[in-house]
Image (cartoon, rainbow, N blue to C red):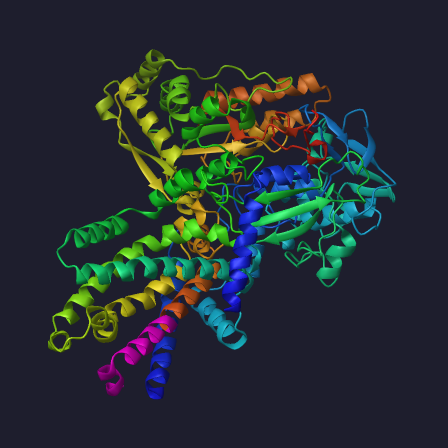
Amino acid sequence: MFRFVIQRLLQGLVVLLVLYTLSFFLIKTLPGDAFTGERAISPEAVAVLKKRFGLDKNWVTQYGLRLKRLVVQQDLGVSPKKNREVALILRQSFPPSVLLGLNALLVACAIGIPLGILSAVRKNTWFDYAAMGFAMIGICVAAFIIGPLLQTQIAMRIPALKVAGWENPLDWILPAITLGLAPAAYLARLTRGGMLEILNQDFVRTARAKGVPPMKVITRHTLRGGLLPSVAFLGPAFATLISGSFVVETIFQIPGMGRHFIDATIDRDEFLLLGCVLYYGFLIVLLNLVADIIQAILNPRLRESL
Amino acid sequence: MRVLMSLFLVLAGALLVSCDGRTAADRAAEAGILIMGNSSEPKGLDSQLVTGVLESNIIRSLFEGLCTEHPSKDGVALPGAAERWEANDDFSVWTFHLRPEGVWSDGVPVTAGDFLFSYERILTASLGSDYAEMLFYIKGAEEFYKRETDDFSTVGVKALDDYTLEITLRGSLPFLPEITKHYTWYPVPRHVVLEYSDGKIDVPFSGWTQPGNLVCNGPFLLKSWRINDHIEVVKNPRYWDAETVQLNGIRFVPVINSYTEARMFFDGLLHITYTLPPELIPFANEHHPEETRGELYLGTRFVRFNVTRPPLDNPKVRRALALTIDRNSLIDNVLQGGQMPAYGMVPPFGDYETEHAVDFDPAEARRLLAEAGFADPSEFPRIKLLTADRDVSKRMAEAYQGMWKEHLGISIDIEQKEWTSYQNAMTKLEYDLVDGGWIGDYLDPTTFLDMWIGGGGNNRTGWASKEFEAALRQSEHVRDPAARLEVLQKAERILMSELPALPIYWYTTNYLIDRRVKGWSPLLLNNHPYKWVSFQTAAE
């Protein structure tokens, strides 16, 4: 197990390096730079600015210098558009995104998993059709429709809820529902599929035959195996949820990470963009590893093979 | 368990606070705090390093220039850091007398030395200010900026004593007080800027503008700043005119989504919005008529022509395209914000009268197009209209496309690019026609005319005219303000006869404002001086 974790961490480092390199050169190929704007800047000022941010050198030298600075000094640089250290921007934007992501995950699990289990147990009944219909809607309807609907139909009618803002825990509710609905739908479908597969196994039939109560069959014998596809999905889904959502964050005015991804790309703010990409990559690597470990704990056969 | 318990308590507390029947805007109004939507996260708060309207909205609360805005009258300069000023006969040498009671928020006096330092700093090219050209009116400033000399004493700014500042200009400028209201002319605290940049003048973003470090001379002080969340300023007790300041603070909220912003206003979370999307204007007018404002805003929307590419190198073709835009129909059906159809480049304001250079005249347009060699519209080459990937831009482009097809029979394609690619293509003249606009910096026609100087960074059309530039230069040496405006009219006439850009409309600003807010009158530059803003009391 220990060797497996170390191996995966080393692989993760390679993934991050490739990610950094690709992103670095891809953004360079886009037209314009961080100093292209609505109002022209004098060539003198542009020259000074480029020199200051080390953008006056050729791409390969820039890449080498920046990578060295990143590895040796753990310095992501300063955003030329926001004029602040990238690390500081990420540090400030990270907590709201994590909170939003965790709440959305909670919503997703609280809705998706029970719905999936019940659908599997009551296969081909009206409940199953209704639940899967809901799941289909959750997947199809975009957050930019659900968000404003919740704002106008719920927040504007209930005084305790605000249409936007991020000040107290009540403000977490509507964005979490908006962001959590799509993964809830996926989870419901995955859980249903996983559970159905296990429910058809011989050992379940044996358990039923020897008179184990139906509830116990589900909790003791099928849930562990039936949740495996959902757990595999939850790792990357969690990373996606906590790295911020541009749409949900702009609709609900949340000072999170999602906006930076989009803004940095549009602004050609390569320092901030690379910071965001590395951060997101790191989360994916880490949470995939966590998902693998949880799967190993749930699945004895997998655990033995590691 | 303890975590759950505390979460429950926080939730219960939040619920109690939220259920007292008052909105956040109500509570803030009672506390004298104005909550404003401010579009997006500011690039910074150093007045010498930013260029945007949203930054200017915040900086205006923190700093004060020599002169300051009148709360309700355009083109009137009130005393700010300077208590009075005078000019010589031809308005080329100005003397500003600073008020002795003026101090920075840390108690250090605001002196002429601070202004000298500030102007030297913004004109030092290695600082990398985007907007140093706003000071090129000063004699020798451009030369110093372009490093033709390193000696700042050659620049026409002198401190005659601690409280007297003399500014010598490169020409005659009767509206200098108007220009000093612009944030690029604001002072920065020399002692603080130098402290955070190791005594160097050209260190940008040294941290002096961060909360806790920022020292300012305006009516408010910086209290807190959270990225993408808010910036809050509170009343500055050391401000020379603190008695006039009614608000206890202002909270600027960067709401990037204008629909969310409107919903926040309707839900009682904001007192003033930054904008109002065109689709919501009819709704707001119907349901919140007292809180919906549409006011003229000093700006022109136009379409640039790339005059280096045929057939747009022919002024007749450009005029034909200009005469077939039905501006009234565009405003009524697409924009719906009460904009004014633009018949010239400079919006009419003050004593300046804009001549009717372009109107809707399809018959004349067809004649001109035939004269240009396109009697048969099918022979007109297929050209592209570039726009940014924004919703309104696209709808406007489709309207132009339809009008040109209907009245001239020519087909024009629309190309959309994301913001930076669009700007990049415009700068490099990689377009045929491009949608654009310009917001005035100060109340003078030159803010709309200077940009068309050949090779200027904001021209972006490839157009140049010696005659036009000569008229602009001539205006700098005319002493009589009325005669000066006539010279500028001549310059605009030349510009409009050649039409490197096709004026579409003059801007309006549409926004929502809480009915309790007082002292917020329509201003062409939309630079509202916060010190006159207050909330209506219950008795009122």
**Residue A163 in the image, given as x and y percentages of width and height:** 47, 42
Depth check: give the residue in front, B29 or B244.
Answer: B29
Whether residue B102 can be seen here: yes
Over which residues does the magenta segment extend? A286-306
**Residue B306 in the image, given as x and y percentages of width and height:** 40, 34
Depth check: give the residue in front, B161 or B495.
Answer: B161
Q: Main secondary structure of the magenta part?
A: helix
Depth check: give the residue in front, A295 or A271.
Answer: A295
Dividing the picture into quadrants, the one containing residue A182 is bottom left
Depth check: give the residue in front, A230 or B94.
Answer: A230
Q: State the residue at coordinates (54%, 25%).
A: B293
Tell me, yes or no, whether the highlighted magenta stretch contains residue A299.
Answer: yes
**Residue A161 in the image, given as x and y percentages of width and height:** 48, 45
Q: Is residue A3 above or below residue A50?
A: below
Tell me, yes or no, whether the highlighted magenta stretch contains residue B381.
Answer: no
Q: Is A250 situated left or right of B512 in this image?
A: left
**Residue B214 in the image, given as x and y percentages of width and height:** 71, 53
Q: Is residue B236 above or below residue B489?
A: below
Q: State the residue at coordinates (47%, 67%).
A: A62
Dividing the picture into quadrants, the one containing residue B249 is top right
